[in-house]
Amino acid sequence: MSSMKFLRQAARSARTFSTTSIARKDLVQDLYVKELKAYKPPAAAKDAHVGVVKNFSLPAVPKPPTLPADLAAELTAYDATEPTKAEAEVTSSSAHAGEDVGKGADAFLGFLEADVKQAEVHH
């Protein structure tokens, strides 16, 4: 029981802090705000940008593309050199010589089902 009495006396005698707004005035914040209000930035000279900024000049106007003088002759020359579909098939089939190209799905399935000959390994 005496320990409870001691705790009560300690709680009463403990120091308490005042939390009123008058006692908690922020001096640093007031000083900062006062200095901010009193600050006047230095006036910049009117020719301060000279030497730092380049003068703007428009780029040169691009030339419009021109058609060749004899357009019809150039188009016929292009058509003559352009490969046709038949020539493209001939060149692609010659590139795959020896392979079963273009024989259909049955030929491909037959190729897959064929037995693979394994080379003999000599030890």
Image (cartoon, grey):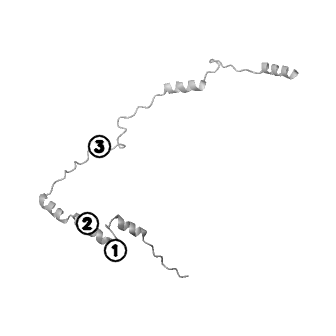
Q: Amino acid at mark 2?
A: Ala
Position of residue 100 measured from the top left corner of the image (x, y, whole percent): 34, 70
The answer, for residue 70, to whether it is visible in the render is: no
Which one is nearer the viewer's eye here, 62 or 86? 86
The answer, for residue 8, to whether it is visible in the render is: yes
| Other residues around mark 3 within 10 Å, as few (<14) / some (14–19) / many (≥20) | few
Q: Is residue 42 left or right of residue 33?
A: left
| Other residues around mark 1 within 10 Å, as few (<14) / some (14–19) / many (≥20) | few
Res. 107 mark: none
Res. 88 mark: 2
In this rendering, the answer to whether 21 lies above or below 85 is: above
Q: Is residue 68 left or right of residue 38?
A: left
In which image quadrant can residue 29 be found?
A: top right
Position of residue 1 measured from the top left corner of the image (x, y, whole percent): 87, 21
Which one is nearer the viewer's eye here, 36 or 22? 22
In this rendering, the answer to whether 71 lies above or below 60 is: below
Measure the C-alpha gap from mark 2 to mark 3: 55 Å
Q: Amino acid at mark 1?
A: Gly
Looking at the rendered image, the disc whose residue lies closer to the viewer, 3 or 1, is 1
Position of residue 40 measured from the top left corner of the image (x, y, whole percent): 46, 28
Res. 98 mark: 1
Quarter holding the C terminus is bottom right
SS for callout 2? helix
